[in-house]
Amino acid sequence: MAKFINMTCFSGSVGGFVGCMGPFGFYVRSKPKKSLKPPTAGQLATRAKMALVGGYLKPLKEMVYLGFAASYKVKSKTAAMNMAVAHAMHNAIGGTYPDLSIKPEQIVLSRGKVPKLWKPQVQLQGKQLHVTWRPLANFCSFADDCVYVLGYNVKAKTVAVREAVREAASVTIDLEAEPPGSTVHLYVCVSNRESKLFSNSQYLGEF
């Protein structure tokens, strides 16, 4: 079903055509047809990788939207997620189809030139993860840079996010609500005070 944007532009399908709004304006393309050919082994592998990466990144999408869109000035959440997915597809998948797995340490949630945390350390005390770091990284970092610490439970698809400023030099994530035997992956992203520029994200380990 088509939806008119104005008198000359529409979105959706009309007959055998689809109207789209792209970065360079309105355009029309042919409506895609379903292929009757069975998928090749390569196509099946690619689909499996896409599903694996998409499933891993979905609970982290809000951080991806911030971390890629801000630094790369992309105009949509979809474009930001596409960049994170593309990196993961090339760098964060282990094994061979159909035995594929994610390499959590290769996942990237943000990119940019803001200095990362300097010498971060993590200590697990009971049900609490204490993350500490050196307050300043170099002359390009600022005391009020925002630090996002994310604890990601892949199995439960839950993300605990804690925020602090760089000069605080510490933040704590409470794991009390996590089911027994849970595994949490820890990521850190740093932005400037306006959250307009970001660092490359850091992976701090599995706990």
Image: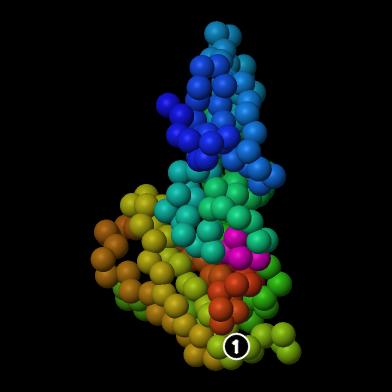
From what the image shows, is residue 48 above or below residue 53?
A: above
From what the image shows, is residue 106 above or below residue 170?
A: above
**Residue at image location 55% in from the left, 88% down from the top:** 144
Residue furthest front as drawn: 7
Residue 147 pos. (x, y %): 52, 78
**Residue at image location 45% in from the left, 67% down from the top:** 150
Horizontal placement of 143 versus 14: left or right?
A: right
What colouring style does the render use?
Answer: rainbow
Residue furthest top as drawn: 36
**Residue at image location 58% in from the left, 91% down from the top:** 143
Q: Quadrant of residue 93?
A: top right
User: Which residue occupies the foreground of this view, 171 or 31?
Assistant: 31
Q: How many marks?
A: 1
Residue 92 pos. (x, y %): 61, 48
User: Which residue occupies the foreground of this view, 115 or 174?
Assistant: 115
**Mark 1: amino acid:** Arg
Q: Quadrant of the N terminus?
A: top left
Q: Quadrant of the C terminus?
A: bottom left
SS at mark 1 in the image: strand
Residue 37 pos. (x, y %): 58, 9
From what the image shows, is residue 138 above or below residue 163?
A: below
Q: Is residue 104 visible?
A: no
Q: Is residue 140 visible?
A: yes
- Residue, disc 1: 134
Residue 27 pos. (x, y %): 64, 33
- Alpha-carbon neighbours of circle 1 within 10 Å: few (<14), some, or many (≥20)? some
What secondary structure is the stretch in magenta mostly built from? helix
**Residue at image location 63% in from the left, 88% down from the top:** 142
User: Which residue occupies the foreground of this view, 101 or 30?
Assistant: 30
Residue range corresponding to the magenta coloring: 67-71
Q: Is residue 198 magenta?
A: no
